[in-house]
Amino acid sequence: MYFLLSVSLIFIVEMFNVGAYFSTSYIDKNALILEADPVPPEKMLGYVPDTSWDLQVGFVTPYLLLAGSQDAAHDFGTLRKHKVSHILNVAFGVENAFPDLFIYRTVSILDHPDADLLQYMRDCCDFIQQARREKGVVLVHCNAGVSRAPAVVIGYLMSCDGQSFEDAFSLVKSARPASSPNPGFLEQLRNYKLPTMNGSKD
């Protein structure tokens, strides 16, 4: 009888282990299926998340700099090295790191092709021109330094410096080779025929 009881217990334990294995496998398989088609982060956040540390700063003009990413705007040593006095933050969800030490303007722009970039241009251009009049140096940054900040700088060069789209894009690309405004922004800038804004070439 003891022998039969032992065999029964062993059989029950083995069946439990097999069931646990198959349950885990089933859960893991379903987890893999769920992870196979994730929602792109830019769809949820409005921008492509930047996870790499980037302190690069591109020289556009003596008074206008293009940050490689938000990291440059959050690194005091980098800001001081480039004699930055004004910071134009066109990122989404990025706080201004040193509000008591620099002059800031925050213009939150979503990095979506269908976002209306041009509606923000006057505010951005006015701020850059303010820094220029005050003999300052303005740093323009977004989250990753790829789409929005370069697009804003291109728009500024066109509207306030009288440059063509091609010349402005080339200058920005030279300052920041990774610059690649999304297709919607590029289309808007190519068709940007608004009158030159106040404070153009002195």
Image: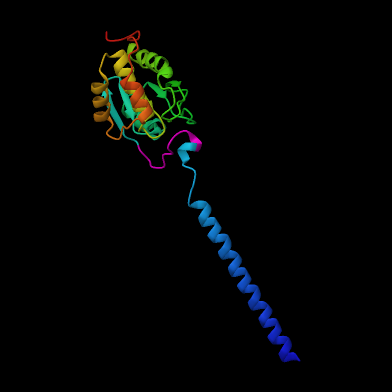
**Magenta-highlighted stretch: main secondary structure?**
loop
- When asked about the image quadrant of residue 193, the answer is top left
Q: Answer with left or right where residue 13 lies relative to residue 87.
A: right
Q: Quadrant of the C terminus?
A: top left
Q: Is residue 137 visible?
A: no
Residue 49 on the magenta span: yes
For image coordinates 34% across by 30% down, the residue present is: 181
The quarter holding residue 166 reads top left
Number of callouts in the render?
0
Q: Quadrant of residue 57?
A: top left
- The residue lying toward the viewer, choosing from 75 and 124, is 124
**Residues in magenta, as a range:** 44-54
**Residue 53 in view in this figure:** yes
Q: Position of residue 20 (x, y in %)?
A: 62, 69
Left or right side of 170 for 113: right
Tell me the colour scheme of the image.
rainbow
Q: Position of residue 10 (x, y in %)?
A: 67, 82
Looking at the rendering, in which quadrant would you find the N terminus?
A: bottom right
Could you say where residue 88 lies in the image, as x and y percent from the top left?
40, 23
Residue shown at 45% from the left, 22% from the top:
107
Q: Is residue 76 above or below residue 52?
A: above
Q: What residue appears at the point 38 percent right and 27 percent down from the top-left corner? A: 184
Which residue extends farthest right? 1
Q: Closer to the camera, 179 or 58?
A: 179
Report the residue at 24% width, 26% height from top. Answer: 170
- Frontmost residue, 92 versus 163: 163
Is residue 105 covered in magenta? no
